[in-house]
Image (cartoon, rainbow, N blue to C red):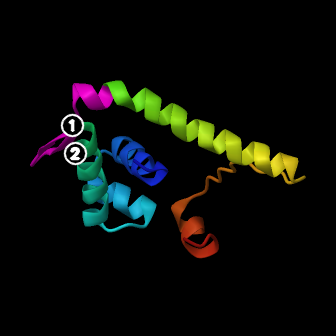
Amino acid sequence: MTLLAYQVFQTVVEQGSFRKASEILNLTPSAVSHAVTSMEQELGFPLFTRKKSGIALTNYGEKLLPYINAILNGQESFKQAVAQLNGLQQGLVKIGCFSSVCTNWIPD
């Protein structure tokens, strides 16, 4: 499994749908579905239940989520540590604004 697969899994959980996750990750919905299916095949159990009303984590998915979050948080900490060693500051900046302002002033 790759870090991208973990990111896909985490984003699907956060967004509650493959389509919304695909928009955030700039992937096609089929690529997101394929990444999740590949993870499920490699692990040997389903991570999500798929219904017409949407998706939900299985018990297996719920048990794996904290580990995947820890891996991705560790990756981010590693990247920030490397940036500091190189004399750079790196971090996460969140910007909030009204949709009317965001549409015109902040690029996608």
Question: In the structure shown, which secondary structural element does the residue marked by tag 2 occupy?
Answer: helix
Q: Marks 1 and 2: CB-CB under 8 Å?
A: yes
Residue 92 screen position, x and y as percent: 68, 48
**49 inside magenta stretch:** yes
Q: Is residue 44 left or right of residue 2?
A: left
Residue lying at 58% horizontally and 66% vertically, measured from the top left: 102
Which corner quadrant of the image does residue 60 belong to? top left
Residue lying at 39% horizontally and 51% vertically, measured from the top left: 5
Mark 2 Cα shell of 10 Å, populated few (<14), some (14-19), many (≥20): few
Amino acid type, callout 2:
Gln
Residue 108 screen position, x and y as percent: 54, 71
Which corner quadrant of the image does residue 75 belong to? top right
Rounded to the nearest angstrom, the CA distance separating label 1 from label 2 is: 5 Å
Amino acid type, callout 1:
Gly
Residue lying at 69% horizontally and 42% vertically, measured from the top left: 78
Residue lying at 33% horizontally and 57% vertically, measured from the top left: 20
**22 inside magenta stretch:** no
Which corner quadrant of the image does residue 48 belong to? top left
Q: In this view, does 10 lie above or below 26?
A: above
Depth check: give the residue in front, 41 or 91: 41
List the single residue furthest toward the right: 87
Mark 1 Cα shell of 10 Å, populated few (<14), some (14-19), many (≥20): few
What residue span does the magenta drawing correspond to? 46-62
Question: In the structure shown, which secondary structural element does the residue marked by tag 1 occupy?
Answer: loop
Depth check: give the residue in front, 31 or 16: 31
Q: Which disc, if any, is residue 44?
A: 1
Residue 40 screen position, x and y as percent: 24, 43
Q: In this view, does 38 lie above or below 65?
A: below
Q: Which disc, if any, is residue 41?
A: 2
Q: Which disc, if any, is residue 97?
A: none
